[in-house]
Image: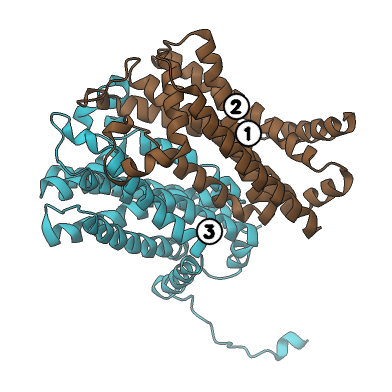
Chain colours: A brown, B cyan
Amino acid sequence: MRRYFSVAGGLAWRLLHSLFTNPLLFLPPMLMPLFFFTAFAGGLSAISNVPGFDYAPGYTSFIFAFVLCQSAAFGGVFSGFSIAADFQFGFGRRLLLATPHRSALVVGYGVVALIRATITIAVVTLVGLIAGLNIGGSGLDVFGMYALAAIINVTGLLFAAGVALRFRSLQSTPLMQVPVFLFLFLAPVYVPRHLLGGWVHSVAPFNPATHVMETVRDLIAGTGTDYLATLGIIVALLTVVTVFMFRGLRQAEAAG
Amino acid sequence: MEAAALPISAPVRRRPSIWTQAPELARRSIKRTLRQPAAVIPATTFPLILLAINSVGLKSATSLPGFPTNSYVTFALAFAFIQAGVFAVIGTGQNLAEDNQGGFFNRLQLTPIHPAALVAGQLAGTLALGLFQAATYISVGLIAGAHIEAGFAGALVMVALVVCICLAFGSIGLAIGMRVDAPEKVQSLFPLIFVFLFMSSMSLPRNLIQTDWFRTIATYNPVSYMVEGLRSLLITGWDGEALALGFGCALGILAIGLFFASTGLKERMVRT
């Protein structure tokens, strides 16, 4: 077990070192959610005047839920880029040779994804509080909100890892980004679900991101919500992406 | 001694004119753009995906008092054109950075290339892609239920403005591409360019933006005027002021971009 965590820790340390010593790798993924937050919360605040918009904490808090999910999910996806890069340039193959338990590698990348998302979410929360984020929920609600973000982060990482391990090339990065982007944007991003129109209104109930985002909004507002249903949905999603990742890992091992 | 054997009056080959050089480089740039489906397809489809999502996600905004139209697709269509411009920055800059990396510029230093031909040639691919995107977005927009208030002539003016916008953004890419040697460095500028896009009147008209600081930024952001120029043709009809501001901003950015691109080119082409 000690060797297992030694591999994960060593890999995480290497990745964190290259991340923090190269601002071009670290800053853009952190800035993206901030841009979305300022653009949506600042530019679209008039949407809260639309008849039927009934989110008490305000539009900044409404958008914050989306940005939190985005920061968490993309924190995982960007670590998938690192996996793809390592395999493309041959380092991944050497890692596979040197590691008896290969899942330790994914744990290493996962630690980096979590640290990355934590920093981004901390910055976004700080900016949110300055910009007028109202949190009506209790301490337990806030803990639940960030715990949910952590699960989204792991889900994003496992999905991106599954793709990266299958293709083992940086050319697969759109395949990691686009589905996550679509999942997020096919949820009620700008307005509550009952104000959505057209085909997005029909699709949203079947999108796991809708339920996660709505739960985050309920936790921010402290209005109480059906946490168990959301937890069930996200655990099911987590199971699917875990299987997807392990199958990818088997393919990477088979490819040698 | 052997040198003396050379003919005394060897024919002096004149440097080809800019009109000969520019089309050759333009053809290379267009072919190169067409041969990169991985760059053309996302640049064309990504704005369409956002249009499809935003047009229903923000449809309720049309019920705000003072919203200029009851069709959000029509309102949002203008933004798709501007997004195409952002991809022009990345595409042009990346191609140029690849030229730097691959030694194309070093080889050009050995030829009597005219700097203006090089700049014009590099922008030809951007122009071709811009025309293709303009035609695609107008067609898809009309199918999705958008309407062009200014009619067919308005659509033609819109294509002209889109081309100017793509060239303006492309010239920024050119200026950046002249100064970097790795395509990844151009890619990393993507979020920065997105700031200009989002901090504009892209999602709501400026008079409906409630947050004061955001409205101020949007007012000083030239992207707002380019969006509003396109939007005027879609929603209002013929609005001379909006069009003048739209074309003015696009041509202004083009001039600034070309200035910085040409200074970058001079530095790049210094013979060592």
- From the image, state whether disc 2 or disc 3 is nearer to you: 2
Instruction: From this view, report whether residue B24 is shown above or below residue A42.
Output: below
Instruction: Please report the residue visible at 17 percent of the width from the left and 32 percent of the height from the top.
Output: B63
Residue B81 at x, y percent in the picture: 31, 51
Q: Are marks 1 and 2 in contact (CB under 8 Å)?
A: yes
Which residue type does callout 3 highlight? Asn
Subunit under mark 1? A
- Disc 3 from disc 1: Cα separation: 36 Å
- For the residues beneath circles 2 and 3, the answer to whether they share a chain is no
Residue B146 is left or right of residue B45, and the answer is left
Number of other residues with Cα within 10 Å of mark 2, as a class: few under 14, some 14 to 19, many 20 or more = many
Number of other residues with Cα within 10 Å of mark 3, as a class: few under 14, some 14 to 19, many 20 or more = many
Q: Secondary structure at mark 3?
A: helix
Residue B265 at x, y percent in the picture: 51, 54
On the rendered image, what quadrant is the C terminus of chain A found in? bottom right
- For the residues beneath circles 1 and 2, the answer to whether they share a chain is yes
Instruction: From this view, report whether residue A84 is shown above or below residue A121.
Output: below
Q: Secondary structure at mark 1?
A: helix
Instruction: Please report the residue visible at 51 percent of the width from the left and 61 percent of the height from the top.
Output: B38
Number of other residues with Cα within 10 Å of mark 1, as a class: few under 14, some 14 to 19, many 20 or more = many
Residue A183 seen by the camera: yes
Residue A152 at x, y percent in the picture: 56, 32
Q: Secondary structure at mark 2?
A: helix
- Which residue in the protein does label 2 denote? A150
- Which residue in the protein does label 3 denote? B95
- Disc 1 from disc 2: Cα separation: 6 Å
Q: Are marks 2 and 3 in contact (CB under 8 Å)?
A: no
- Which residue in the protein does label 1 denote? A154
Subunit under mark 2? A
